[in-house]
């Protein structure tokens, strides 16, 4: 078509690289919401005590069985840019609280589903986001107002509360049939930590030993780690001590070839012997210094060679090299002392001690146990079970329970689980919405409906009539019964979950509501996606400058050139 008379032809301005995909406007927003709903529908069946597990096989053929929301999203390898937001909030929930990862994704998905109609009708996303934030603020104030603060002064009562919180966290996991056993174990593990370090859960070691039953799992009040690689002389070393002195090192105790490609020029054979003797002299000097400290157990992060192993065996000293960093750190936390990076000037205060050290067989593995530690602010869980995937899921379940108990110990504020809190928030926001004029009222009501997804999905996964259960819950909450939630074990389907001891730290709920509202507002604020085609390809990294390879190889393994 010819250009209108008097107007010059407008040249096409190319701003983006050819092939760049740009999608914008309402269709893009609806597409992002659809992607997020697909993610939340994937996780929906895993929620609650009767939730199903997912079997996920990765590209290497390794299978994982889990119903932990954050783990599933991590294994799914999601590529949609907007849907990755849900992965991020699930990870944040897992890191901050440990539990509620599925709930936060489901709630974010439900909020987006409820407000999708407003987007289609042309309501500005900014107005919707403002309403969602207002609803989240109302919900957080309500949680603070109704949460129950537990009295920590009565230690027995407080311990029983923690056991109930741990049991609630485990009720939707693979280990729900062993709740009493594992709840006791988790609470003992968390209470053994130091309050001064904010109950640092990295000091709880978890070791997995295939074989045996789940009830064969045990809690070690101290440290246990798998026997490290050892040389022949290790079998002649004593395997048990009472009140031993323990020395932890970060040095190598072996004769080794020079790492630095050192070149030693010698004129006669005698000089070569002097070099060899010097190496032996250095290692013997180190070993003598260690023996003089009086240590009976020597641990090192770096290798302990066959010479040193036999030398220690001849003097009734136990040694272990290549001890993993985390295990060595926990040994120091338990027995006292400090990790030494030299054998000179080791003083008595640098050594630790414990009531007993012993090497014991568990399943097909041998473990080194340090028990009765005076400074013990650490412990070890040894998990038993059949299949490898099963034990890994037990570990994930216990991690969630440990995080929940840690939060309950730190704050001591709980609410009822099983959808009771969400139903109360829904009823409260509905009531508050009537006091607000304009479109905000509709958006608050939409968020109130979205909160019902949690009890609805718990009931649905348990095989109950979700509509019937929700009607009962709405009616009883309208009558002022604050803690009524879903009961998956009875025909009626509802009960007072505070009296039934289905308790959760209130922090789980505040994080779920806050995280879901944040993700919802973030997705609503995006109306254009610009995707470079190169971003879809695996990134090989920057190219090396020409000649770099030759320069790197030059001189490798060769001596200095003759002058």
Image (cartoon, helix red, strand yellow):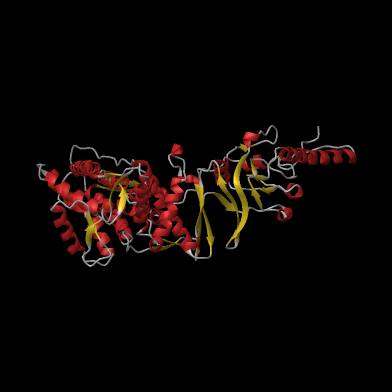
Please name whichever residue, 550 or 124, is drawn nearer the observer in this view of the structure.
Answer: 124
Q: What residue is shown at x 38% (from left), y 45% (from top)? A: 155
Picture coordinates of residue 348, whole percent (x, y): 65, 35
Please name whichever residue, 131 or 462, is drawn nearer the observer in this view of the structure.
Answer: 462
Q: What residue is shown at x 38% (from left), y 63% (from top)? A: 53
- The picture quadrant where one finds residue 340 is top right
Q: Relative to residue 308, is residue 138 drawn left or right?
A: left
Q: What residue is shown at x 38% (from left), y 55% (from top)? A: 73
Q: Relative to residue 50, is residue 554 drawn left or right?
A: right
Picture coordinates of residue 223, whole percent (x, y): 55, 49
Please name whichever residue, 2 or 108, is drawn nearer the observer in this view of the structure.
Answer: 108
Picture coordinates of residue 273, whole percent (x, y): 86, 41
Question: Could one spot residue 20 in this view of the protein?
Answer: no
Count numbered badges in the picture: 0
Q: The C terminus is located in which quarter?
A: top right
Q: What residue is shown at x 15% (from left), y 60% (from top)? A: 471
Question: Could one spot residue 395 in this view of the protein?
Answer: yes
Q: Relative to residue 441, is residue 490 drawn left or right?
A: right
Picture coordinates of residue 374, whole percent (x, y): 55, 42
């Amino acid at each position: 078509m010819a250009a209108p008379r008097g107007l010059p032809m407008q040249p096409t301005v190319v701003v983006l690289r050819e092939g760049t995909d740009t999608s914008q406007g309402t269709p893009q927003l609806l597409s992002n919401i659809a992607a997020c709903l697909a993610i939340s529908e994937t996780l929906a069946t895993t929620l609650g005590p009767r939730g199903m597990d997912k079997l996920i096989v990765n590209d290497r053929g390794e299978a994982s069985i889990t119903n932990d929301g954050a783990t599933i999203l991590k294994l799914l390898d999601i590529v949609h840019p907007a849907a990755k937001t849900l992965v991020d909030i699930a990870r944040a929930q897992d890191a901050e609280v440990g539990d509620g990862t599925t709930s936060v994704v489901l709630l974010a998905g439900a909020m987006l589903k409820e407000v999708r109609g407003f987007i289609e009708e042309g309501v500005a996303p900014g107005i919707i986001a403002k309403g969602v934030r207002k609803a989240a603020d109302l919900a957080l104030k309500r949680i603070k107002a109704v949460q129950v603060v537990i009295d920590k002064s009565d230690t027995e009562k407080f311990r029983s509360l923690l056991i109930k919180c741990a049991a609630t966290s485990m009720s939707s996991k693979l280990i729900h049939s062993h709740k009493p056993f594992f709840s006791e174990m988790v609470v003992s593990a968390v209470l053994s930590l130091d309050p001064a370090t904010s109950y640092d859960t990295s000091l709880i070691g978890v070791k997995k030993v295939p074989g045996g039953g789940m009830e064969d799992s045990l809690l070690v009040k101290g440290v246990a780690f798998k026997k490290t690689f050892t040389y022949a002389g290790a079998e002649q070393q004593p395997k048990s001590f009472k009140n031993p002195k323990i020395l932890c090192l970060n040095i190598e105790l072996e004769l080794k070839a020079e790492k630095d490609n050192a070149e030693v020029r010698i004129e006669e054979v005698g000089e070569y012997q002097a070099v060899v003797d010097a190496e032996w002299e250095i290692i013997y000097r180190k070993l003598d210094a260690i023996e003089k400290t009086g240590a009976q157990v020597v641990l090192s992060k770096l290798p302990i060679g066959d010479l040193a192993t036999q030398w220690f065996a001849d003097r009734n000293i136990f040694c272990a090299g290549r001890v993993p960093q985390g295990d060595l750190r926990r040994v120091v936390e338990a027995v006292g002392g400090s990790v030494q990076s030299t054998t000179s000037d080791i003083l008595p205060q640098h050594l630790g001690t414990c009531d007993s050290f012993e090497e014991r067989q568990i399943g097909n593995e041998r473990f080194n146990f340090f028990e009765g530690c005076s400074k013990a602010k650490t412990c070890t869980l040894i998990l038993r079970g059949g299949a490898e995937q099963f034990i890994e899921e037990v570990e994930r379940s216990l991690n969630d329970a440990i995080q929940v108990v840690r939060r309950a110990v730190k704050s001591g504020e709980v609410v009822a689980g099983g959808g009771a809190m969400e139903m109360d928030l829904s009823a409260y926001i509905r009531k508050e919405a009537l006091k607000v004029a304009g479109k905000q009222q509709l958006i608050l009501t939409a968020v109130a409906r979205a909160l019902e997804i949690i009890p609805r999905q718990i009931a649905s996964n348990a095989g109950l009539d979700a509509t019937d259960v929700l009607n009962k819950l709405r009616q009883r909450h309208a009558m002022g019964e604050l803690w009524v939630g879903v009961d998956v074990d009875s025909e009626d389907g509802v009960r007072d979950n505070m009296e039934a001891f289905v308790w959760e730290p209130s922090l789980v709920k505040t994080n779920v509501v806050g995280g879901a509202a944040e993700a919802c507002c973030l997705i609503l604020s995006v109306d254009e996606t610009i995707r470079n085609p190169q971003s879809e390809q695996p990134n090989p990294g920057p190219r090396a400058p020409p000649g770099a390879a030759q320069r790197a190889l030059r001189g490798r393994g060769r001596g200095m050139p003759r002058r």
